Amino acid sequence: MRKVMIIFGTRPEAIKMIPIIKELNQQAGLQSIIVTTGQHRELVKQMLAKFSIESDIDLDIMAPQQTLTDITTRTLQRLEPVIKEIHPDIVLVHGDTTTTMAASLAAYYQQIPVGHVEAGLRTGDKYSPYPEELNRVIADAISDLYFAPTELSQQNLLREHHQENHIYVTGNTAIDMMKYTLTKNWSHEVFNQLPADKKLILLTMHRRENWGSKMAKVFAAMNQFVNEHEEVAVVFPVHPNPIVQKLAHQYFDDNDRVQLIKPLDVIDFHNLAARSWVVLTDSGGIQEEAPALKKPVLVLRESTERPEGVTAGVLRLVGTNPDVIKTMLNHLLHDEVTYQSFLTNQNPYGDGQAAQRIVKIIAQWLLKEGDTDCASNY
Ligand code: UD1
Ligand code: UDP
């Protein structure tokens, strides 16, 4: 049995690693060992429980108001003995969080090969998103196998001279996850209580570079827009980060047409997104899911590492300028042609088979001792 150690710590990593864990469990010759860092204690536990997955080892690093240094040092320190004792054949990390970066480094220090799922995303600006851009550059510098979700991310890796025959275009496992979440018979009290004639704006905002005045301006703009348009309602599942919580409550507690709710589990989130009118977000993962759901997404960021959705026409970068956001929402509300222009049949992020491809490549690599060719690209 070859040992595949899957290390993750936050909500989006858990969501996009679950399809891989499910595939690994079906793969002969490979044993999966799940290590959670605990960077997101509740969010990840909630997620894994929904899918009857348990972590084998939890490093329990989370602290209120944790700094980037806290996350990095605790992950490195607590992972070292775990990796030494288990000595996996490969460590799999996902995406661009500080867990991702620190776990890659911890594996490298023990000279264990690293596979990076969702490799090669770039904005080219190390402060946008911060610190994710540098986290993924570091993870890619360390990695031995690259699972690039799109051809564009493959090109980014080639431009940085990563080894060509170790890069595989697989699609994004976010799309695979939707096979397990979307359902016609979904019901949820928040959705059930919304008047049927309201257009639902689903809002999420949590990024570090938006904390403070940028987030405050967006929240003020949303209050104004909702107050001026009876026909819309906003639901905002608020990230547990106390900084985000405080600002959200400060701006929205007095507005009963903006509902602040606890973070939804991924099944509820995907189903609510599928029933919304527009999604407004600074999230990375939601930019991938929305094209699959055919929902217009206004991205509350200045740049995106997921430009495929912008090209396909389903994502629009609106930044955090209140006037731009309100103007765009007005267009969507009053101009059906604009709204329809967002709805695309193109889903640039995958076909729902990414996890299967990734596990097949890992199996070939570990069980046949060495390189595979790129034939698995789709
Ligand atoms: C992290 C990632 C970010 C990712 C986001 C996804 C880093 C530096 N940031 O940002 O890339 O987009 O997750 O959501 O890796 N908290 C809880 N319970 C939880 C989770 C969080 O209470 O289950 C609170 C804690 O007080 C914690 C705070 O949220 O200190 C912030 O969490 P942290 O992981 O540091 O930053 P995020 O903004 O969540
Ligand atoms: N998500 C969720 N519940 C919520 C909000 C988001 O399950 O209340 C999911 C969403 O479907 C996506 C992922 O969380 O798959 C995105 O996570 P987040 O926005 O926290 O992080 P990012 O993708 O920006 O790193």
Image (cartoon, grey):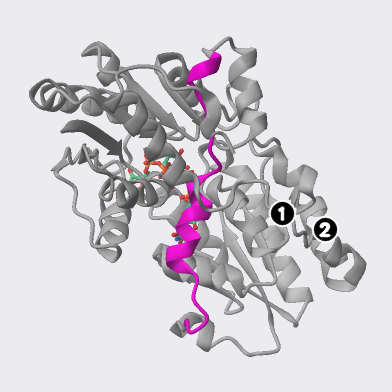
Of 180 and 372, which appears nearest the observer? 372
> In the rendered view, would you say 286 is above or below 8?
below
Of 218 and 3, which appears nearest the observer? 3
What residue did someone put label 1 on?
A: 298
> Residue 328, which numbered label?
2
- Indicate the amino acid at tag 2: Met
Look at the image and say whether residue 176 sits in the magenta stretch: yes
Q: Which residues are magenta?
A: 164-186
Find ligand 1 in the image and state its quadrant.
top left
SS at mark 1? strand
> Image point 53% across, 13% down: which residue?
162
**Do the numbered discs 1 and 2 sit on residues whose CB atoms are within 8 Å?**
yes
Q: Residue 10: where, in percent of width, then height?
A: 36, 44
Residue 101 in sight here: no
> In the rendered view, would you say 59 is above or below 160?
below
Residue 39 in sight here: yes
Q: Residue 305: where, in percent of width, then height?
A: 63, 34
Identify the image quadrant of the C terminus: top right
